[in-house]
Amino acid sequence: MATILMYRNEGDRRMCEIALTNGDRVQLRLNKAGLVIEQIGLGEKASDVLFEADADVVADMCASLLGPTDIKQTTPLDLLVGVVSQIPSAAHVRTSFRAATDAL
């Protein structure tokens, strides 16, 4: 089960850090420019950008995930954290989000 380690959904620099099921740590950073999902390097392991998209792509992704839900009840960060926290590893985050972008 994933664990949310840090969560900030206010101001200009919305972000969340999640420890995924396999122990990988990822950070989602959301701002006016778009979204960056990065695997956090621990120890000798370097950080790695898993996915990056501009605001228009992120808006399309979030809209397609919402369905009939009232958009005022959730934020883009909440929605993205809900998705990422169910993905078991950083490698799967990378492939899942890139595949989702290709499908738009």
Image: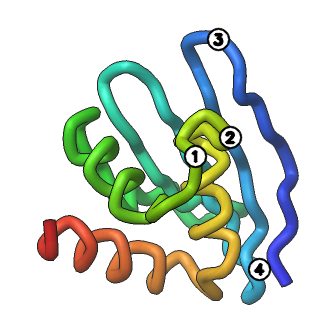
Please tell me which of labels 2 and 3 falls first in the chain. Answer: 3
Please tell me which of labels 4 and 3 falls first in the chain. Answer: 3
Residue drawn at x 13%, y 72% as measured from the top left: 102
Q: Is residue 82 above or below residue 47?
A: below
Please tell me which of labels 1 and 4 falls first in the chain. Answer: 4
- Neighbor class of circle 1 (other Cα within 10 Å; few <14, some 14-19, many 20+) is few
Check disc 2 and give the amino acid type.
Gln
**Disc 4/disc 3 C-alpha distance (Å):** 29 Å
Which mark lies nearer to you, 2 or 3? 2
Callout 2 secondary element: helix
Q: Quadrant of the N terminus?
A: bottom right
- Neighbor class of circle 3 (other Cα within 10 Å; few <14, some 14-19, many 20+) is few
Which mark lies nearer to you, 1 or 4? 1
Residue holding disc 4: 23
Relative to 23, 81 lies left or right: left
Nearer to me, 6 or 66: 66
The numbered dot on residue 73 is 2
- Neighbor class of circle 4 (other Cα within 10 Å; few <14, some 14-19, many 20+) is some
Please tell me which of labels 1 and 3 falls first in the chain. Answer: 3
| CB under 8 Å between discs 2 and 1 | yes
Callout 3 secondary element: loop
Residue holding disc 1: 70
Relative to 82, 92 lies left or right: left
| Position in image of residue 65 (x %, y %) | 44, 64
**Disc 2/disc 3 C-alpha distance (Å):** 18 Å
**Disc 1/disc 4 C-alpha distance (Å):** 33 Å
Relative to 25, 49 lies left or right: left
Residue holding disc 3: 11
